[in-house]
Image: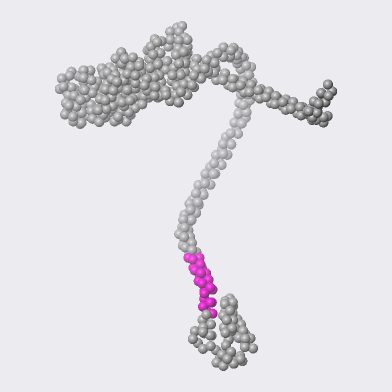
Amino acid sequence: MAISLGSMFVRIGATTGGLKTGLMSASGMIGKFGGIAKGAMMTAAGAVAAVGVVAGVMAVKSVKAFADVEEGYAKVNTLLDEGQDSQKIFAKFVAETNVAMGNQGDQLDVLDGLYQTISAGITDTTEAQEFMEAATIAAVGGSAKLSDVILAGTKTMAAFGEKAGSAMDVMDSFAATVKAGQLTMGELATAFPKVAGVAADMGLSLDETLGIVAGLTKVMGDADAATTGFSAIMTKILQPTEAMKTAVKSLGYDSALAMIQEEGLMKSLELLNEAVFKDTAAMAELFGNVRAVRAVLPALGAASEAVATSIESQGDKAGLAKKQLGDMASTTKFSLGELTSAMQNMMVTIGEAIMPAIQPLVDMFAEFLPTAMEKIQPIILQVVDVLSELMVAVAPLIPPLLEIASMFLDTAVVIIKAFIPAISVVVEWLKLLVDPLKVVLGWVKDLFEWIEKLVEAWAEFSSSGVAKAGEWLSNKLGGGGAPVPTSETSPALAGLPSGAVPGSVINQTNEIIIQGREKSSEEIGREAKMSIIEMGG
């Protein structure tokens, strides 16, 4: 065994020092593991705390979301019979419609629409849900507010009754109008109720009414202008001018309304136009209303083809609203909206589940608050009394302080007013100095230009003028065809050896002239003479 253990120690290099090192390394590893474990525990604790915070925030938001939705259901309950609970009846439908709306609303919007629908007289649960479903399809497909579409739909169905068809038929009619005209679903939904009721009472069909609106939007400002002009036409039909009465009778009808009910609006307008031989002024006289004329003339002229096409398009409207919904539902934005709506539904459900646990606390706080206020009220009243006494004590000081402030203000105003004329004088004086300063600056500019030219002239003289002078002197003394002076021919060279030519004298004279540019003429002359004497001596 000893040999075996010894061999083992040899193989693993286990000396006393090695064993100590190994133990220290193991201890370090254990310490590191302990640090890692501690860090992991702290991270886990932080994660748990973060989850707790998130859960708390979600709980608060869930309760608030449920509270808002609960209030929406309570509003719907006010329209239901005794014992009916809108939340039990419509909860599933509201959640599903919320998702179906995608990014165009939430449960509160659905509940508001449900309230509108029931308020409009669609009280049957099934019919209300069918109408809401059709309105949702049209709203999403036409990118319009659900509440606007519901308002237009309920008004239209109430006005035209069974002639309008089902709720889906009405929404298809709206979709066809938007496609044929120059307007949006939202604009149509807000404008159409202006004419729906009157048009239906006069006997116009829904298709013709919507077709006229769509056609007029092609030449008039917008849907509102088109429906306003349309409404003016119908008003003059119901309250005809004498000229219109005469024209209608000439066409063989008892009244303008009777003609409309028998022929339809567009055909009646065409008959009246022919009765006055398509004279624009005469048509204007028939209606006697500017707004009506602004709609009649385009309807018979520039927009006549558009109106006819729009009326015809109503015959091919089936399924159009669902087609438009499919176009919008295929977008990423709508899909994200569906996801958001599903999360909203989940928050409401969580809030509904949490609320029973929170309700006792809310009730307890509601009971505690009045008691706490009773105890706090005396303290508050004491503070109010102290503040009142303080105000009474300070009150006498307020008028003098206000008077002092007023005096300072008046003084400031006087000073400002006094300085204004002086400032004006200074400004005018500065204005007068502008032109003289311009002249002076011009002189300074001219002076600098003259100095610059003088410097350039002096530089040119320095570089070439002196050299030319030396060259001239050299020519005079020994070149340029003049006889070279010698000791025999020039008294100035007397004393020099016979026949000597003072060539070096010329060079030295030039050098003296060049080096003596800054010397006076007398100094240059003396130096030249001394140089000549030295050369000769």
Front in this rendered view, residue 372 or 495: 495
Residue 306 seen anywhere in this rendered image of the structure: yes
Give the magenta part as a residue range.
446-470
Q: Tell me the residue at 66%/22% (across/down).
A: 45
Magenta region includes residue 389: no
Left or right: 357 as drawn, with respect to 432: right
Quadrant placement of the C terminus = bottom right
Q: Tell me the residue at 52%/44% (across/down).
A: 413
Front in this rendered view, residue 487 or 352: 487
| The furthest residue to the front | 3
Residue 381 seen anywhere in this rendered image of the structure: no
Residue 137, percent across and down? 39, 19
Q: Tell me the residue at 38%/18% (across/down).
A: 135
Coloring basis for residues: one colour
Q: Is residue 481 above or below residue 199?
A: below
Q: Is residue 415 above or below residue 168?
A: below
Magenta region includes residue 450: yes
Left or right: 508 as drawn, with respect to 298: right
Q: Is residue 403 above or below residue 115?
A: below
| The furthest residue to the top | 83
